Amino acid sequence: MRRSTKKLLLIAAMVMWGDAALAESAVVLVTSSDGPIQEMSSLEVRKAYMGVAVTVDGTTVRAVRRADDERLNQIFLQSVIAMSERSYERRLLSLVLRSGVPRPAEVGDLEELSELLERIPSAVSYMWRRDAEGDPGVRIIRILWQET
Amino acid sequence: MTHSRRIKTARHRLRMAILVPLLLATLFAGPQLRAEPQHDVLVFLSLEGHDIRSTQNPELDGFNGHGTADLLYTYNSERFRFLAEYILSSSENEMERFKAAWRIDDQTLLWLGRFHAISNYWTTEYHHGQYMQTSISRPGLEEWEDESGPMPSHVTGLALEHDFPLSDSSAMSLGLAAGLAPKFAVDQLVPFDVLNPESGHDLSLSGRLVFRPDVLSMKQIGVAIAHNDIAVVSDSSPNLTDLNAIRQTTAGIFSNWRWQDWVVSTNWVWFDIEMQYRDRDVDDNFLMGYVQGEYDVSDDWTIFGRIEIGDNEDASPYLQLLPSVIAHRHMLGARWDIADSHALTLELADTSTQGDDLNHDNFKEIRFQWSAVFP
């Protein structure tokens, strides 16, 4: 399916589901519950996801992407990265090509994400707030987006 | 088995020893985070058709097509980074970059190995990633050595990269490099061959300073300088008889700027060349440059054009040693991003190459290309 078509369907779904599904929706930045990262500004989050080295609380941040939730990814890209998916992907490819900076790792489901956050204390990722609140292994660093 | 055949076989085995793991990594790896260190693999593929028509010199007429695969592997840990880039095409197989870095801190990397010349703007932006550049062709100024590029593209040695943050989002980037420059043989520059270390190469020194107003965008403006002592294989061509060395100093200014749907990239390089013959020195000064404009018509379509011109380059004795170097070009093209990571591109150009004397070879070009990146 073309990216533009996906976006249209996503917007349509948001409009149709509107109040019912999204009223309480929020996307949050998370890390391991016993990880060292306590706070991150939105610029630091953006930098970490765009391949710029970010050190917070003495730790180099590892950004982790989600490959399992199209809607979550679209919101993250639009609200946090402020780029279209194509521009973002090109930017990451360019960093690999120019400087050898690997792209952020991707996880395929929540279980894999929890496992990874536990294994790598410097890793951060994004989740729906309801998922984060239901997982004792993760700690919310900040709210990235909230449905108003 | 003759000595040269043994060397050829050894080189082939070494290339395969490097290439096979890269190919396997390509099949089984993506961006992963299985442990602390990270690695990534990219494969850039392209197929290109190129047709030339000349009213001035029908010998230039013809069509050729070629395919290219560019394999890139990177490994990154807390203090160490490694990058290898291998190109396989219908015309060459070569380890383009093979370098390792010690990460001194978050802002500083010290590289050792074979890398692309840091003073070449286009080369350091796109390398061999054909999909990443909007146009099919590269500017003549920044062509590879084996495509009659006038500047060295590959250096083997040390390179230092350091970023100076200026604010939360802007930075200056400094690059310094020292290593072995290409030598000049027949009608082109020939990079240092790691497999033949005694091949007679001299010193290359270069530096660049880049201002990035927003480190999260591609916007940049910078200056670059380089000095290359280029050894000459005098007996490789009658044109090089009695020419012992070429001292090439370059100074350039480059920029890539975006305004909404427009992107303009440009690079202007001043060449100061001393050609050292057995009985005399010949000084040569000229300017080469280009401006490329791109306009995003929609998410999927981009139109672009480029003008390549110069000053005093038509009479350059140095460029006359590179008969295929692009002297002038006016090009227009369109790119269609047909899927997430595939593009079709068409280019039309009116081009002049240096030719064998002061009379340029002029011709019309049409190029079309499919390019993609995986995974």
Image (tube, rainbow, N blue to C red):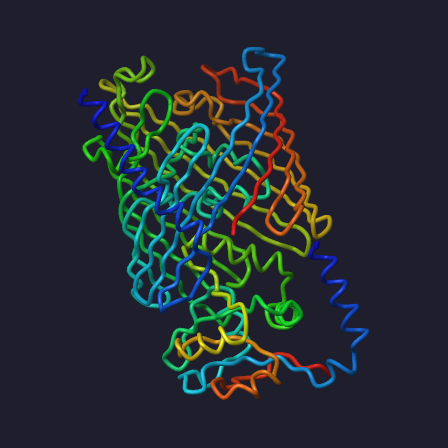
* Residue at point 76%, 73% (across, down): A14
User: At 47% across and 81% down in the image, what residue appears?
Assistant: A31
> Compared with residue B223, is residue B214 higher up or lower down, i.e. above or below?
below
In this rendered view, identify the residue nearer to me: B43 or A95: B43
B88 left or right of B158 in image: right
Q: Position of residue B10 (x, y in %)?
A: 23, 32
User: Is A39 displayed left or right of B296 in the figure?
Assistant: left
Quadrant location of the N terminus of chain B? top left
Percent across and percent down for residue A80 are: 60, 72
Is residue A142 placed above or below B253 in the rendered structure?
Answer: below
Q: Is residue B16 left or right of residue A13?
A: left
Q: Quadrant of residue A70?
A: bottom right
Q: Is residue B254 above or below residue A85?
A: above
Image label count: 0
Task: Tell me where residue B245 appears, x and y as whole percent.
Answer: 26, 27
In this view, the residue farthest toward the right is A16
Judging depth in this view, the residue of B183 and B284 nearest the camera is B183
Viewer-nearest residue: B221 or B74: B74
What residue do we see at 58% from left, 78% from top?
Answer: A127
Question: Where B354 sits versus A96, above or below?
Answer: above
Q: Position of residue B228 (x, y in %)?
A: 31, 37
